[in-house]
Amino acid sequence: MAPKETRAPSESLGPAYKPDIEKPIATVSTKVPHENVHVLSQTPQLIALLTMIRDRRTNRADFIFYSNRIIRLLIESGLNHLPTLPHEVMTPVGKTYAGVKFEGKICGVSIMRAGEAMEQGLRDCCRSVRIGKILIQRDEETSKPRLFYEKLPADVKDRWVLLLDPMLATGGSALMAVDVLLSKGVPEERILFLNLIASPEGAANFANKFPKLRVVTAFVDEGLDEKNYIVPGLGDFGDRFYTL
Ligand code: PRP
Ligand code: URA
């Protein structure tokens, strides 16, 4: 468990025009000291969406809908880590605009099963993006990950890889997936791990083992329980998205 004092116990959320006294108090992400772990801005929208998916009473249809909205925010934020080149265009009124364009090839890699829930969000932003799969399952007794299968684009080592998994608990599964990518020749600094909820332990494991890899997460929670579930968390993401 992370020490309580690392967590912002409460923070008022709301638009600037409202006096502080009228803003709701909400629990926001634990602050982590790792340079390669980027936490989304703790906006009222994001906190409200996370509140929906954390609620045990939320049904599957709503869980999918609100998760997808957070996934979209994560993908858009993650794409900001990709390199761009200067790109000037002419507008319809005959003026030039000094802009940028994306550089380099990308692909998604989902950690099955829960990571597959993030594929559509990536496709919605990056048309016809290639997507590889790694099947890793956490043993329910020991929490240790087991690798069953991987199928990746043949040229994965030449691409930026957006690694997808909504839950980062002990970090075992995601670290194993990164090892697979490294064994295929993908440079560590070209991997972006996109994640909904991380534990401080998982975030620290990543930051220490792979300091050049970037993690983009919506929220760092309090810690892990005795079964290595994230707390307060949202339970089993895969079950709530696919089967419950
Ligand atoms: C979940 C989750 C991560 C992993 C996180 O998957 O989607 O892959 O556990 O735990 P860790 O950080 O301690 O490794 P799970 O193995 O339960 O399979 P699922 O995707 O089929 O639900
Ligand atoms: N996997 C999940 O889906 N949730 C957790 O809290 C931990 C692992």
Image: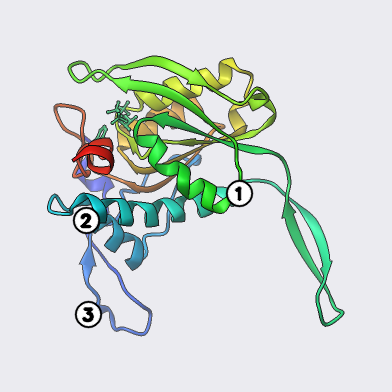
Of the four image quadrants, the one with ligand 2 is top left
Mark 3 sits on what residue? Answer: 21
Give the structural element (helix, strand or loop) at label 2: loop
Q: Position of residue 72 (x, y in %)?
A: 45, 54
Left or right: 196 with respect to 231? right
Q: Is residue 132 above or below residue 117?
A: above
Give the structural element (helix, strand or loop) at label 1: loop
Q: In this view, does 20 lie above or below 219?
A: below
Front position in the image: 182 or 11: 182
Task: Assess disc 1: are there few (<14), some (14-19) or many (≥20) residues with their C-alpha within 10 Å of its C-alpha.
Answer: few
Left or right: 157 with respect to 108? right
Mark 2 sits on what residue? Answer: 9
Q: In which quarter of the image is the N terminus?
A: top left
Query: In the current view of this chain or complex, which residue is farthest to the right?
Result: 94
Mark 1 sits on what residue? Answer: 127
Q: Which amino acid does label 1 sit on?
A: Arg
Task: Assess disc 2: are there few (<14), some (14-19) or many (≥20) residues with their C-alpha within 10 Å of its C-alpha.
Answer: few
Q: Which amino acid does label 3 sit on?
A: Ile
Q: How far apart are marks 2 and 3 (CA)?
A: 17 Å
Does the residue at mark 1 contact the one at mark 3 (Cβ under 8 Å)?
no
Give the structural element (helix, strand or loop) at label 3: helix
Left or right: 55 with respect to 67? left
